[in-house]
Image (cartoon, helix red, strand yellow):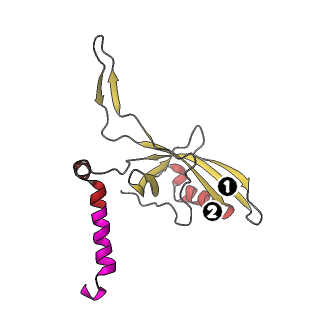
């Protein structure tokens, strides 16, 4: 990942509500006069869109707006952000694409007693390339007993870090 801009640590990650992974189609399909249609890969890398939603306090929303303008270049630049995917919560390279004519939508919401106002911000992020297992890692997962492998790793970790004396290292 070659991005230099990062999502601020002071802001929360997106909520689960409305979150979804939407890969873009990278296959070209040609209907034939007779027989099955032909399909071939058009691109080796296709972007993915992820609709996201944040729930910000008043102060967090102020930070978001300033970060979006100054660091995110009003949606023009890629940035690094931890997002949920098949490998768990890992760093993704993202940028704002929004929906329609707006890069994001912000709606105020009343908080509970003593909480002040909240802001619900929704947008769509474009992910340059989703982190996935490498092909060699996939081959291991498909060929081996993954549950047993993870159990062995957990057991080894527990042995090294809790059972063995600290002075041995």
Residue 161 belongs to the span the image colors magenta: yes
Q: Is residue 92 above or below residue 8?
A: above
In the rendered structure, the answer to whether residue 18 lies left or right of residue 152 reads right
The residue lying toward the viewer, choosing from 118 and 84, is 84
Which residue is pictured at 56% across the width and 54% down the height?
15
Q: Is residue 2 above or below residue 50?
A: below
For this orientation, the residue located farthest to the right is 113
Disc 2 vs disc 1: Cβ atoms closer than 8 Å? yes
Where does the N terminus fall, quadrant-wise? Answer: bottom left
First in sequence: mark 2 vs mark 1: 2
Q: What separation in Å lies between label 2 and label 1 (alpha carbons)?
A: 9 Å
Q: Is residue 78 visible?
A: no
- Secondary structure beneath dot 2 equals helix
| Mark carried by residue 119 | 1
In the rendered structure, the answer to whether residue 16 lies left or right of residue 126 reads right
In the rendered structure, the answer to whether residue 79 lies left or right of residue 158 reads right
Residue under label 2 = 60
Q: Position of residue 138 (x, y in %)?
A: 26, 49
Q: Which contiguous range is marked in magenta?
A: 151-169
Which residue is pictured at 29% across the width and 75% down the height?
159
Crowding near the residue tagged with mark 2, few <14, some 14–19, many ≥20 C-alpha atoms within 10 Å: some
- Secondary structure beneath dot 1 equals strand
């Amino acid at each position: 990942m070659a991005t230099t801009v990062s999502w601020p640590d002071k802001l929360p990650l997106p909520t689960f509500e409305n979150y979804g992974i939407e890969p873009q189609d990278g296959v070209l399909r040609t209907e034939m006069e007779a027989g099955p249609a032909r399909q071939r890969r058009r691109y080796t890398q296709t972007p993915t869109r992820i609709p996201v939603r944040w729930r910000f306090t008043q102060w967090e929303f102020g930070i978001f707006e300033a970060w979006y303008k100054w660091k995110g270049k009003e949606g023009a630049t890629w940035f690094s952000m931890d997002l949920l995917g098949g490998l768990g919560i890992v760093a993704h390279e993202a940028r704002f694409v929004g929906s329609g004519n707006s890069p994001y939508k912000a709606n105020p919401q009343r908080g509970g007693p003593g909480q002040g106002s909240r802001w619900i911000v929704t947008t769509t992020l474009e992910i340059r390339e989703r982190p996935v297992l490498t092909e060699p890692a996939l081959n291991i997962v498909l060929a081996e007993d993954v549950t047993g492998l993870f159990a062995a790793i957990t057991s080894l970790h527990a042995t090294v870090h809790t059972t063995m004396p600290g002075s041995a290292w």
